[in-house]
Image: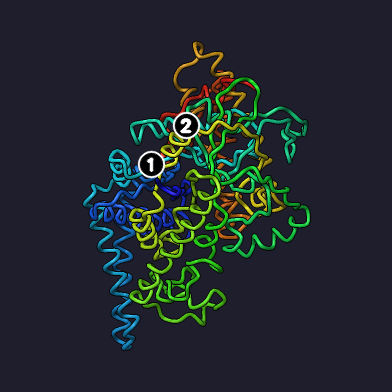
Amino acid sequence: MSQGYLSFVLHSHLPYVLSHGRWPHGTDWLCEAAAETYLPILRVIGELIDEGLQPKLTIGLSPVLCEQLADRQFKEEFVVYLNQKIAAAQHDSEEFAKYDQTDMLVNSHHWEAFYSKTLDRFNNIGQDILFEFRKLQDRGYLEIITCGATHGYFPLLSRDESLQAQTKAAVKNYEKHFGCKPHGMWLPECAYRPRYEWTPPVPINGAQESYLRKGADEFLSENGIDYFIVDSVLLKGGKSVGVYIDRFDALKLLWGEFSRQYAPREEEADKTPREAYLVTSCSEGKKPTAIFARDPETGLLVWSGEHGYPGDGNYLDFHKKRFPGGLRYWAVTSPKSDLADKIEYHYETALERIEENATHFVDTATELLTADFAEKDRPGILVAPYDAELFGHWWYEGPLFLKETLKQACLSSKIDLTFLSEDLERRKPDRVISIPEGSWGQGNHHYIWLNKHTEWTWKHIYKCEAKMCELAAYWQANKDKHDDDLEEILKQLARELMLMCASDWQFLISTFAARDYAELRLSEHYEDFQRIAEIADKKIAGAMIREGERQFLRDCQERDVLFPELDLDWFAGVEYPA
């Protein structure tokens, strides 16, 4: 019998960037992730299958990412992007040859081959990345889970209708792209909220009164979602170790301000991340939702650029790039090295580190699971969730590490790989618990998404949430009195609200990763929402809509074109009110 089960879970997500800039912020983000993460993951899973192995990887694809990968505009942009990278490598090769920079020339040839093969692979799959993921799921090699539709931060959204829309849109979108219903959902930022009387952190239309909000688990249960993933500290208490703080210096400064208010919960010894539990935050007989907890022991081994595998000095450095072209030619050297001290990268040397790192990870997971088995005499589970973009984008060699890790786990005589839905069926948890509000950020609270730099964003989001629900409720009550024109206006209004609600904007502001871009994007969606709402009000009042206003609406519909399956009923009222 297996000593335990390992579940690797990758969460793939990018905000909606199509038609919203290219470089340095915009569509290039999507193209980078497709070239460096999504296609390499598909490649290594295919290679494992060709070796006769059963990799069993769980991967989350956010609905907003799915919409972009399926969009013709992305496919055209991606081909252009890859050809630009090939040309950049060729340009660099000419210069390196001219100046007799032998090692750099080897690297530029590597990049030319990498992007040329990526272009060939993209064309060979009919430019359909999503369909490749779907085929692997249909064949039993992947389990694809969903996420909040636009990655809205559930605990801070003010309306239950918003969580309802984020969840229902996710399920509908999943069915459209993958032909079945999702079993699991990755809550954006692993951020959970229970049902309770909530006071908004900023006023809503001038008021700041408490009111009852439903728990995030309730919306998942109502829409057939079987499980979600939480940080282990939300499950059992103890000291929180955030997943982002090593990567962004700005978060260390923010954490310095909030850490004085943080007191770790006392650990609950009777709970363990080696088991699945059921969670419910209401007393109305609603079906509980299962939770799996992130393993704390193995997390930093992969997450941390300072203490984990990606910090190995032989791996490719993410930050130092050569311009024009933006290609990377230098090694990490050491986590403390500044850009001027980076040494030249050697791909073959980096490859030599993969097997050792993967072996260490699998050995660590095996030790934890066998120790748990010895204590309980039943196999436990170790859940290893990460942002997918870490593998390939942030850590270039990451997909090769993933391949070797999955391969060693497949060949292990002590542990087995598993999908989370498969483990849920095997384990059949029956212990119902409550967990507190929180995320997987340092301290498990919301300071990354709600702080002095981002407070203004929630004021605007709350105002638009209220207006959206008001107009949707009017539309629902007066469907027979209006033509389809109002419905289309309100659907575009809902798209702008959902895009405004993406947690990415607060994250990018707080980390200073792309602060100007994030502030501009949220502001633009807010301004577009306001103008479309004015058009809707005029339509309801029977006033004439000017041609310029109609052209503005058409432009918004052509630019922000996601979620054609959107339903205004989701915003008109809560299906099962608290």
Count of all numbered marks drawn on residues in the image: 2
The residue carrying mark 1 is: 143
Residue 569: image location, x then y, percent: 52, 22
Crowding at dot 1, Cα within 10 Å, few <14 / some 14-19 / many 20+, comes out as: many
Relative height, residue 260 to residue 418 (above, below): below
Identify the image quadrant of the C terminus. Answer: top right
Does 18 sit left or right of 72 as displayed? Answer: right
Q: Residue at x 49, y 11 (%)?
A: 480
Q: Looking at the picture, how far across and down is residue 406, in whole percent? A: 37, 55
Task: Give the residue at the far top of this rendering.
Answer: 480
Task: Pinpoint residue 477: horizontal percent, then vertical percent.
Answer: 56, 14
Q: Secondary structure at mark 2?
A: helix
Quote the CA–CA distance across marks 1 and 2: 19 Å
Kind of residue sitting beneath label 1: Glu
**Mark 2 burial class by Cα count in 10 Å: few <14, some 14-19, many 20+:** many
Residue in view at x 57 percent, y 76 percent: 336
Residue type at tag 2: Ala
In front: label 1 or label 2: 1
Toward which corner of the image does residue 471 lie, by quadrant?
top right
- Front-most of residues 287 and 186: 287
Q: Is residue 203 left or right of residue 310?
A: right
Q: Earlier in the sequence, mark 1 or mark 2?
A: 1
Q: Secondary structure at mark 1?
A: strand
Who is closer to the viewer here, 545 or 520? 520
Name the residue tied to disc 2: 169
On the question of residue 524 being in view, the answer is: no
Does 193 sit above or below residue 44?
above
Tell me what residue is drawn at x 50 percent, y 36 percent. Answer: 227
State whether residue 393 appears in this view.
yes
Badge number at residue 230: none
Foreground residue, 510 or 36? 36
Quadrant placement of the N terminus: top left
